Amino acid sequence: MAPKLLITRRLPPDAEVRAARDYLVENNRDDSLWNNAQLIAHAAGKDALLVTVTDKLDADTINRLPPTVKIIASFSVGTDHISLEAANARGIAVTNTPDVLTDATADIALLLILGAARGAAAGTAAIREATWANWAPTGMLGISLTGKRLGILGMGRIGRAVARRARAFGMEVHYHNRHKVEGEGEAIWHASLDKLLAVSDILSVHCASTPQTRGLLNAKTLARLPKGAIVVNTARGDIIDDDALIDALSSGQIAAVGLDVFNNEPNIDPRYRTLPNAFLLPHLGSATLETRNAMGFRALDNLDDFFAGRRPRDALTS
Ligand code: DGY
């Protein structure tokens, strides 16, 4: 008999069709957000869970999952919503969906860089609110990307894809990563975050959210950026301290931000909405139909491997 699979959110149609072909699926028909008690109740009797970033699988929730659950396949590259330690301790496998969302997320990072540098939030507001008086030689002047130094914090797959795009815009690429990355000859490696910050006209965040990176961009570190720098985040909101970033935006230490991810999504700090130099998107990094289907397929590939007795290619637990 096919394994029993709980899918906690609606997936794009092609991924749902494939899941229903190969598994006995329970779907979340109305795509509502389940709290942890509801998730645990729906997991009763299931062999596998296909979850995503809106499911908060902390240690307590994992410990209360029914004993039938053998694998959690996350429809996401990030896994900060899952306690890998608790899953490991219970012998539950966990997988994610890297690679397939790299280009879509790098595209959104470039959209944020351009949007922040060229004042897209204020420009869009002027059109929508009919406050655009006339074209002026000194009106709405942004910052050119050509020749600027882009600092990439976290040179993984997405960071490298952003670097490729940035070179096409004539930017000089710098990065900080624990180790120098092979094959990134033209990009300049900085062994410390402080050194990267000092040379970043534009800083783009691409590191994972971990206990070490939470709050990494705070009053102290943001002050190390050149005055008038731009900060862009497509990784996770909790890497940035909102109070510090909003202070820096208000004082002019940071000229503009482009943010796709936030603390406490979707209830973001309301002060961001009032800042004309904040270009904001609602966590759209992987949001193309092609990419979301590919993420669904990748999660299902991992489940197929697991139930065929193979180690899934994206296994994160031992
Ligand atoms: C992820 O995959 O971690 C993104 O945040 C959603 O695509």
Image (cartoon, rainbow, N blue to C red):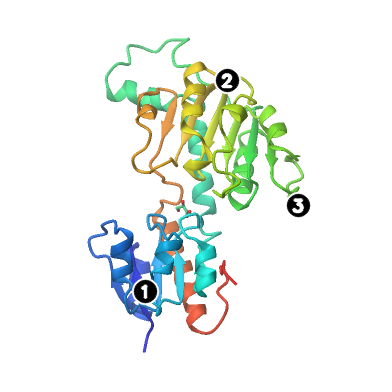
Front position among marks 2 and 1:
2
Disc 3 crowd rating (10 Å Cα; few below 14, some 14-19, many 20+) is few
Q: Amino acid at mark 3?
A: Glu
Residue occupied by mark 1 = 19
**Are the two marked residues, 2 and 1, in contact with CB atoms closer than 8 angstroms?**
no
Residue occupied by mark 3 = 182
Q: Amino acid at mark 2?
A: Gly
Q: Nearer the viewer, residue 96 or 82?
A: 82
Q: Find out if the beta carbon at label 2 lies less than 8 Å from the nearest ligand 1 atom.
A: no
Front position among marks 3 and 2:
2
- The picture places residue 264, in percent across and down from the top left corner, at 39, 42
Q: Earlier in the sequence, mark 3 or mark 2?
A: 3
Q: Amino acid at mark 1?
A: Ala
Farthest bottom residue in view: 1
Task: Give the position of the C terminus as an image quadrant.
Answer: bottom right
Q: Which residue occupies 62% across, 30% down?
A: 221
Say which mark, if any, is on residue 228: 2
Disc 1 crowd rating (10 Å Cα; few below 14, some 14-19, many 20+) is many
**Are the two marked residues, 3 and 2, in contact with CB atoms closer than 8 angstroms?**
no
Q: Which residue occupies 57% across, 20% down?
A: 228
> Label 3's element?
loop
Q: Which residue occupies 33% across, 64% down?
A: 8
